[in-house]
Image (cartoon, rainbow, N blue to C red):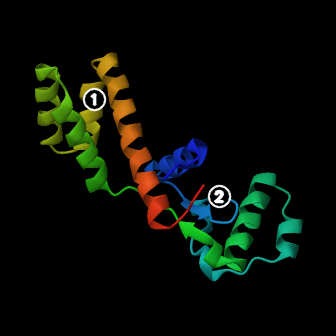
């Protein structure tokens, strides 16, 4: 199945984001962010009056998006955040495919210590070339996850 790269990239980026809640607008094929500041926002009803009274443009935009989602919930799918075990698996997969045995050993040790995410990044920071390889590998992995998410939800773009 073919996907427009910008939408796939947006979904992939949303999956990696730890802040807020991300939704896919099915009809418009766009990704929407709702800030964590709104707490249990699904329980709130947003009125046009509230939106019109809001002076802060960013807040107004969030309120408009919340209203769109609450007015038509079947048109939106929450984009799942990557769970830590999934991110860890991507780090392990990257480590396994490295040809530099010294770097591979250092990353294996980093992953087996407390705070593996921090330690992994600390080791990568030692070698900019490997760090850039990591970014490409990680991005490709999340692009695949995004494509799978879109396919599972029958989203054609």
121 and 32: which is toward the camera: 32
Q: Is residue 26 left or right of residue 92?
A: right
The quadrant holding residue 54 is bottom right
Query: Which label sits in the foreground, 2 or 1?
Result: 2
Is 42 situated above or below 64?
below
Q: Is residue 78 above or below residue 96?
A: below
On the question of residue 80 being in view, the answer is no
Image spot of residue 122 (x, y percent): 27, 29
Query: Does the image show residue 75?
Result: yes
Mark 1, other Cα within 10 Å: few <14 / some 14–19 / many ≥20? few
Which residue bears the numbered disc 1? 122
Which numbered tag is attached to residue 29?
A: 2
Residue 41, horizontal then vertical, whole percent: 62, 74
SS for callout 2: loop
The residue tagged with tag 1: helix, strand or loop?
Answer: helix
Q: Earlier in the sequence, mark 2 or mark 1?
A: 2
Q: How many marks?
A: 2
Q: Closer to the camera, 93 or 152?
A: 152
């Amino acid at each position: 199945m073919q996907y427009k790269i910008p939408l796939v990239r947006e979904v992939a980026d949303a999956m990696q984001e730890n802040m807020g809640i991300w939704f896919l607008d099915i009809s418009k094929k766009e990704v929407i962010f709702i800030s964590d500041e709104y707490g249990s926002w699904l329980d709130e009803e947003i009125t046009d009056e509230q939106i019109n009274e809001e002076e802060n443009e960013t807040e107004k935009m969030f309120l408009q998006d919340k209203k769109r989602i609450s007015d038509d919930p079947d048109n939106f799918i929450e984009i799942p955040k990557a769970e830590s075990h999934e991110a860890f698996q991507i780090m392990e997969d990257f480590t396994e495919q490295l040809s530099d045995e010294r770097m591979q050993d250092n990353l294996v040790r980093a992953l087996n210590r407390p705070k593996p995410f921090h330690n992994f990044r600390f080791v990568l920071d030692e070698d900019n070339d490997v760090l850039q390889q990591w970014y490409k590998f990680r991005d490709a992995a999340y692009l695949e996850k995004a494509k799978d998410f879109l396919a599972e939800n029958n989203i054609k773009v």
